[in-house]
Amino acid sequence: MKKKILIISGGYSKEREISLQTGNQVARELKKNGYKIKVCEPNQKLFKLVEKYKPKIIFNALHGQYGEDGYIQSILEYIGIPYTHSGVIASAKAMNKEISKKIFIKNGILTPKYIKYSFNEPFSKTNAKIKKNIGFPVVIKPINEGSSVNVFICNKTNLKKNLKKLQDYKEILIEKFIPGQEIQSAILGNKKLGAIELKPKRKFYDYKAKYDFKAKTKHIIPVNLTKKKFDELMNISLKVHKLLRCRGVTRSDFKFYKGKFYLLEINTQPGMTRLSLVPEISAFRGISFINLIKLILKDASTNK
């Protein structure tokens, strides 16, 4: 008899729609393969549903705030049923772009130079810091968001205008824009899964480029790297996965420029939608979508 699985999707973040797509895709595939499935939101009904349904594993299909920052993970630890993906601390570290960057730097992993910006600081002071420590163009992004939500590439003339768009956030990360190849890699259960190169028709691989078919982002697999460079990429990916003590599957986002890999961030809850990269990387390796899900379920645990 196949296990009962409870899938948590939706949530309250700006990535809600993507989470629902991930949850639906996973649920559809598991049902086709004979699993008993329930899908629920992370709300007050969760505890009652767990008590009544008694799932063997909880599949975390949430994205963004509350879903991949340690919040839902702490609740799942309290519930005490094995759940997929990374645990509380690994999720919190990976979601916070400043904390994760500090870990990268401390461990010799190249990442774009950055400064932290808060809105109570005079713009002239921030502008001076950028000129001195980073240089234009820059990328501005919230410290705790995923899927390139509210990310902007800025030059001297549009920085102030774009910063105003992010005033709902307490703090912003401003980092050096790195040109070059956009490459994303995947690790699954401490094993190197593979990588994919992206050529967006937009300025960069933003939210629309990721999830809108009309954006027509070109996916290139295998990536255009020598074997030596590909091995280097995957070694860095596995290193950061282990450094943060991640579990299950992670996706790391890189820029490759002038022979060097710049790690932008690591994602502990990569999407499982029709346009998501981890299923595509897995398929290239001969791992079907259902087998990918099974491998993620196999790694489910508590006390992470």
Image: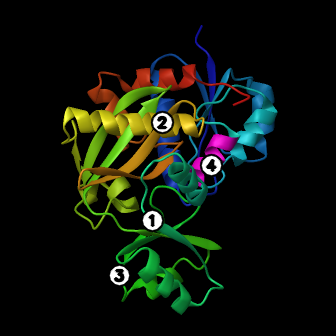
Location of residue 80 (image quadrant): top right
Among the two numbered marks 1 and 2 on one chain, the one whose residue lies closer to the N terminus: 1
Of tags 4 and 2, the one toward the viewer is 2
Which range is magenta?
Answer: 89-95
The amino acid sitting under disc 1 is Lys
Dot 2: few (<14), some (14–19), or many (≥20) neighbours within 10 Å? some
For the residues labelled 4 and 1, the Cα–Cα distance comes to 18 Å
The residue singled out by tag 1 in the image is 113
Side of 52 where 94 appears, left or right: left
Magenta stretch: residue 91 in it? yes
Residue 252 shows up from this direction = yes
User: Upstream in the sequence, badge 3 or badge 1?
Assistant: 1
| Residue nearer the viewer, 136 or 290 | 136
Q: Distance of mark 1 from mark 2, alpha carbons? A: 20 Å
Q: Is residue 288 left or right of residue 63?
A: left
Which one is closest to the eye, mark 4 or mark 1? Answer: 1
Please report whichever mark, 4 or 2, sits nearer to the chain's N-terminal start: 4
**Sequence order check: which comes first, mark 4 or mark 1?**
4
Q: Badges 4 and 3: C-beta atoms under 8 Å apart?
A: no
Q: Position of residue 106 (x, y in %)?
A: 55, 50
Quadrant holding the N terminus: top right
Circle 3 sits on which residue? 155
Q: Which residue is mark 4?
A: 93
Label 2 vs label 3, nearer the camera:
2
Q: Amino acid at mark 3?
A: Asn
Label 2, on which residue? 239
